[in-house]
Each structure stands twice: as structure tokens, then as C-alpha cells.
Image (cartoon, rainbow, N blue to C red):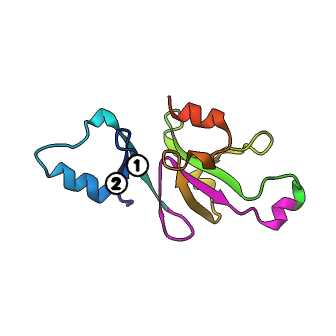
Amino acid sequence: MREIKFRAWDTKTKRMLSWKMLLAFCDLEFVFSPLNELILQQYIGLKDKKGKEIYEGDILKWQVPSSLIKNRPNRPNPMVYYCIWSDRECLFYFKSQHAYPYNENHFIYYVKCDLEVIGNIYENPELLEDKQIRDDENR
């Protein structure tokens, strides 16, 4: 069974709050940020190649194996994705930030490669080169 936990982006202070911090504040009689100022992000139950937990909103990179580059020589390398929840499919998936035809999205159960968390959409929006994606996430 996977562990259920969250982290939160505080839109007021512009900082990420860890699961431990959230649990500590739950024990207090006051909350330093109203809930409408926190954006909760769920741990998806997977870790990257370095053992770092992957959360909704994380930005990940994948170094494309040379065997795949031979088939598509113009493929960006590394590929960059971000983790997002799909209400329609009821699951997390990795959304590509690359333009067509390299805009492949991957459902988590298909991913068996070496992904690395390189940031998240709130603290490192510059890692997503496509402005349209950042605008969609801020809605």
C-alpha cells in the first residue's frame, strides 16, 4: 500500500510546505495560512531515480536512450515532463512540455525509465519553456 501524504505551495509566502510542516501545523490551534492560500499536491507513490518522492506539480526530466533517438533524430533530449492529475482518467500522468510531435504524455503505469525530479511548477516555472503550459496550470 502506498503512503498518502501531501505538500503544499503557499501562494502568500511563495514557499513549499513539506508533509511534516503540514502535520505540525495541524496540531496547532491556529493556521498561519488560510486554506485558500495553499495549493495541495499529493505524493503519487513513486520515487525518481535518485530516490526523491514525486509529487503532483513536479517537473521531471528523462534522458532519452540512444536507441530511441535513432528513430527520431530531432527528439529533444532530455525530455521534460510535469506530473499532473487527470480528473477524466482518475490518475496521475506525466505531461510533456514539448511541441508536437514530441508532446507525448505518459500514464504513470507505462513509465519504466529513469526520471529525475528537477523542480516543480511553482518554484521553477522557468523549467517549462512553453508559456501556454504555465498559464494552464495557473487557472
The location of residue 88, given as percent across then percent down, is 53, 32
Residue beneath the point at 75% across and 62% down: 64
- Residue tagged 1: 42
Residue beneath the point at 68% across and 44% down: 129
State the residue in front, 109 or 80.
Answer: 80
| Numbered label attached to residue 60 | none
- Residue furthest top in the image: 139
Q: Residues within 10 Å of mark 2 (few under 14, many from 20)?
A: some
From the viewer's perspective, is 17 left or right of 26? right
Which quadrant, please, contains the N terminus? bottom left
Can residue 68 be found in the magenta stretch? yes
From the viewer's perspective, is 55 left or right of 65? left
Residue beneath the point at 84% across and 60% down: 69
The location of residue 67, given as percent across then percent down, is 83, 65
- Residue tagged 2: 5
The location of residue 57, given as percent across then percent down, is 50, 47
What segment is highlighted magenta in the picture?
47-69
The location of residue 103, given as percent across then percent down, is 73, 43
